[in-house]
Image (cartoon, rainbow, N blue to C red):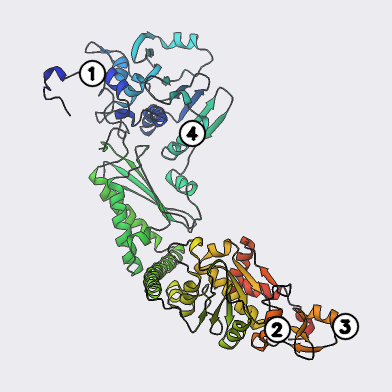
Amino acid sequence: MADKNYGINDIDHLDTREAMRTRIQMYLGSDDTDGTYQSLKEIINNSTDEALAGYGNKIEIYLDEKSNTIIVRDYGRGVPFGIKDGRNILVAIYTESHTGGKFGKNAYKNSSGLNGIGGTAVCMSSEHFRVTSIRDDGVATAYFQEGNLNYYKEISKKEFERNNPDKDCRNGTIIEFSPDKKVFQNAEEGYTFDRICKEIKNISYLNKGVHFIVSTTSGKKQEYYSENGIADFIKDNIEKPLMSSPIIISKTDGVDEIEIAFMWTGGSYKEYVFVNGLYCPEGGSPVTGAKTTITTSMKRLTGKDFSPELIRKGLVFAINCKVANPSFANQTKSKINNPNLRTLASAAFKEGLEIFANTGSFASIVEMMVKFQKAEKAADKAREAVLSHTKEMNEIRKNKLAFIEKLSDAEQLGQDAILCIVEGDSAGSSVAMGRDTKKYGILRIRGKMKNCLKAEDEEVYKNEEIKLLLYALGIDINNYNSSKLRYGKVAICVDADDDGYHIALLIMANLHKICPQFLKENRLCWLRSPLFIEQDKNNNPISWYYTDEDFNKARGKLKGNIKRIKGLGALSEKDLRATMFSTTGGQVLDDIEYSPEGIEQLCALMGTDITPRKDFVMNRIDFSQYGDM
């Protein structure tokens, strides 16, 4: 609870140094590692401001990995220095807030700096900070420790050149600093070459024609240079491009300029906004203008009522703004507010989309959107079907309606129980006679099941046989729980012929579609039916054979009657108990082991694409035996 005696004695004043060192996150956005990199970007922003103003086309960034010290060298005009109104200007720039050359209209037309705080915040939060300004009329150096001025000196340009014979003494600014561990929580982690390169690479896209050179004490070196600006940025930050090149448009209102680049891809939607070389992750007014125009223009150009989300699916765009007086939402400049940027972005995207509509890529992008729209509608219907199915299953369970005509449950349900899926009432009735009723359940399906891999979800969950299968197994499609299964395994139980094998594939395909986890748990098996049975004079089974090959090997030794099994319906109760449901070795129950390769082959054979099936057939049949066709 707040002190009720709160009064004037509770009011404190912090000078610039103390305020920044104790609340650095207010100025650099964070007091951890991100804050230290923001320090680097603030210094580089000053150098790129010079480049945007037309001074200097090279910026060098050097990392001393042992001391975690950064040196940034540009070749601009150099920071002004000297005495004005009794104040040391170079010192004031880095120690007093709201002191800099970016307030007027003459020094910089476009600048990412706003209120002269960036460089000051870096100086105040550094363990040591040195600025050296080289100008035609001399060289000045100011050195600070923990934000306090240690020394300041001015020398002539010639003296500086004599003292630094190995340095490039052209005009410009050299900043050397190291983040203070007393200010930043993770300062000891230090800068890394890789992250510096990542930051500089993005900055290079916004400064066409400027060379950035990153190097370290250990000899690492990387250069960045972008000739095409945000067009290069778009190309380097997309996956699966669906257009040959980005659409690029520039617009100006006479004061501010804006450049856009966009491209549709097979990846995810992304947007990037840059203002005077600074990345604004929260976007702002230009994004608002872009999104509105993208939606209205694409609806007009396609004549279709696409949703905004569908239109932007796979779209990647970048907006590069050059603004004379940027209005940022916060000190970290993560969002730009200038209203005119919304108008400029809208005009740029309108023109760009009209150009795009006359390219060869437009039709394919629209076709993609149509497919997505159909898929969204199908997904909505599928969700409705799932909800309806879940409600129906709950009613069935509640009323204990167990599909009595099609499902003969085992007496003891659970993990040890096996559900035999049989095609047709005749085969189902026959198999039911020979089963062990305690362990085996019988599910009779009607002819060949619907192929769920070819059907829409809406059709799948409305199909009676799929409902029956899900109920029989006790599967909740919204919340699969193996411990609640009514049967621990499913046994495919079909005739040993082509139709039977096709039914088996349909069963596998449908289980993969409606409950892939069931297959991954290796709960599917094949209960083989015999092709031949040798019987004694009383029609008792003596021996049985599951393949033609095994039967042919034993043919010369057979003495009893040979019964050719034409289908499950031809098996007697004695036959079934001796073979398929034998407990003494006659049963052949093969586990169907799950594998990604097997599923891939299953989907190729049973899916909607006919090409894999065609290749499968053509690669496995020798058509030469059929002569000329």
**What is the spatial separation of the Cα atoms under label 2 and label 3, in whole angstroms?**
20 Å
**What is the spatial separation of the Cα atoms under label 1 and label 3, in whole angstroms?**
107 Å
Query: Mark 4 belongs to which amino acid?
Result: Arg
**What is the spatial separation of the Cα atoms under label 4 and label 3, in whole angstroms?**
79 Å
Question: Could you tell whether 74 is left or right of 309 in the image?
Answer: right
Q: Position of residue 418 (x, y in %)?
A: 58, 71
Element type at mark 1: loop
Dot 2 or dot 4, earlier in sequence:
4
Return the mark for residue 575.
Answer: 2
Query: Mark 1 belongs to which amino acid?
Result: Leu
Q: Position of residue 203 (x, y in %)?
A: 43, 36
Residue closer to the observer: 471 or 171: 471
Position above or below: 291 against 116: below
Element type at mark 3: helix
Dot 4 or dot 1, earlier in sequence:
1
Query: Mark 3 belongs to which amino acid?
Result: Lys
**What is the spatial separation of the Cα atoms under label 2 and label 1, in whole angstroms?**
97 Å
Instruction: Report the quarter where the N terminus lies.
Output: top left
Dot 2 or dot 3, earlier in sequence:
3
Instruction: Sort mark 1 into few (<14), some (14-19) or many (20+) by Cα contacts within 10 Å.
Output: few
Return the mark for residue 195.
Answer: 4
Q: Closer to the camera: disc 2 or disc 1?
A: 2
Check contact, mark 2 vs mark 3: CB within 8 A: no
Question: Could you tell whether 598 is left or right of 486 in the image?
Answer: right
Q: Position of residue 25 (x, y in %)?
A: 32, 29
Return the mark for residue 14.
Answer: 1
Q: Closer to the camera: disc 2 or disc 3?
A: 2
Query: Mark 2 belongs to which amino acid?
Result: Asp
